[in-house]
Amino acid sequence: MSIIRHERKIKLSFEHHKYLDVRRWNIAHTLFNNTPIHAHHPLPIWEKGEPTSKMSYIFKIDQTANRPTRTFLNTTYYFRIDNSGANSYLIQNPGY
């Protein structure tokens, strides 16, 4: 299983699959609990170092010390079952 997880991490690294993968594998609480929330801030970069030249952006992670931490609840693993038109025999997921 670790080989598959590693392959998905490499192949799908820029396709935003990590969050759903770690939820599916039931390991999100070990990865996300008590970890700092990072923010990506765009910083303008000028080609010739002057604001009048061509500009592009880079994204830098905010490294400030007072960042809140994440809490991943076990109920976050489940999605709410929509009651409209649902089968009456379905049982709602815990926490909803």
Image (spheres, rainbow, N blue to C red):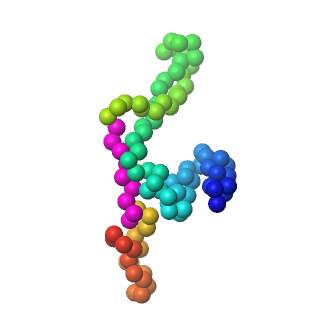
The residue shown at (50%, 62%) is 26
The residue shown at (35%, 44%) is 69
In the rendered image, the quadrant that contains the N terminus is bottom right
Q: Quadrant of residue 79?
A: bottom left
Q: Which SS type dominates the magenta stretch?
A: loop
The residue shown at (66%, 57%) is 4
Compared to residue 5, the image places residue 14 above or below, namely: above
The residue shown at (48%, 15%) is 51
Left or right: 36, with 49 as reference point: left
Compared to residue 81, the image places residue 70 above or below, namely: above
Query: x, y percentage for residue 84?
Result: 38, 78
Query: x, y percentage for residue 9?
Result: 62, 49
In the rendered image, the quadrant that contains the C terminus is bottom left
Compared to residue 66, the image places residue 24 above or below, namely: below
Q: Which residues are magenta?
A: 67-75
Instruction: Using the rendered image of the protein, determine whether residue 54 is visible from the camera's viewpoint.
Output: yes
